[in-house]
Amino acid sequence: GDSVTQMEGPVTLSEEAFLTINCTYTATGYPSLFWYVQYPGEGLQLLLKATKADDKGSNKGFEATYRKETTSFHLEKGSVQVSDSAVYFCALQKETSGSRLTFGEGTQLTVNP
Amino acid sequence: EAGVTQSPTHLIKTRGQQATLRCSPISGHTSVYWYQQALGLGLQFLLWYDEGEERNRGNFPPRFSGRQFPNYSSELNVNALELEDSALYLCASSLGVNWNEQFFGPGTRLTVL
């Protein structure tokens, strides 16, 4: 079945450091790919998305490129801030799976000042 | 514009009891999704309702059920509660079928004692 694998966490960085959170997926066809963020005590917020190969999603300084050849959708940010501390989830969605989102395990990011 | 709302925020029950969780989607959204976020198990798809009908179901036992009302709000019912049902239950809504972006509520924290 479809699955998403994220790099194991937690990740701890200093402010202004470069961030990469790896995400790979297993799915047939052409899923849409998403990054969601969950701040403490809150629900999930969509951070960015890409719907086809080579698309780049971007938002709030975060970027991710849909790489079909490596089945990856790695999240990057050039300079993290303390306010970026949260849990980040990679997810995929396929029309044939009835609109459900399949999530990775989540990666806890802590940014220290 | 009001986002997805869920009630109650917290719910404490004992084993064997029933729990009812409620969700109000964003105005104009006809689809409602339920996800379970249990410690160590990540985010798992539970149910999807659209236009009052159950459209898809995740790999959960029948004691997890729900419904969608004519105003598109939804209830999730969990019967015969077990300790492992303790989790954050997230509701999301979207404009409808066909891969639309899902917007999440803040969740209901269910604790089973």
Image: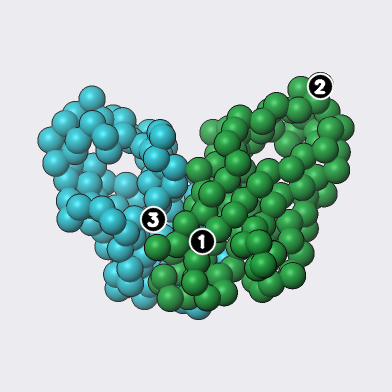
- Marks 1 and 3 on same chain: no
Chain of the residue where label 3 is placed in the rendered structure: B
Question: Is residue B35 shown left or right of residue A57?
Answer: left
Q: The residue under label 1 is which amino acid type?
A: Thr
Q: The residue under label 2 is which amino acid type?
A: Pro
* SS at circle 1: strand
In front of the other: B2 or A10: A10
Q: Which residue sits at x=33%, y=68%?
A: B56
Shown colour of chain A: green
Residue A26's disc number: 1
Q: Which residue sits at x=19%, y=35%?
A: B82
Q: Which residue sits at x=54%, y=49%?
A: A5
x, y percentage for residue B66? Answer: 26, 58
Residue linked to disc 3? B45
x, y percentage for residue B26? Answer: 52, 62
Shown colour of chain B: cyan
Chain of the residue where label 2 is placed in the rendered structure: A
In front of the other: A104 or A87: A104
* SS at circle 2: loop
Gap in Å between the C-alphas at discs 2 and 1? 36 Å
x, y percentage for residue A110? Answer: 68, 28
Q: How is the image coloured?
A: by chain
Q: Compared with residue A4, is residue B70 higher up or lower down, i.e. above or below?
A: below
Residue linked to disc 2? A113
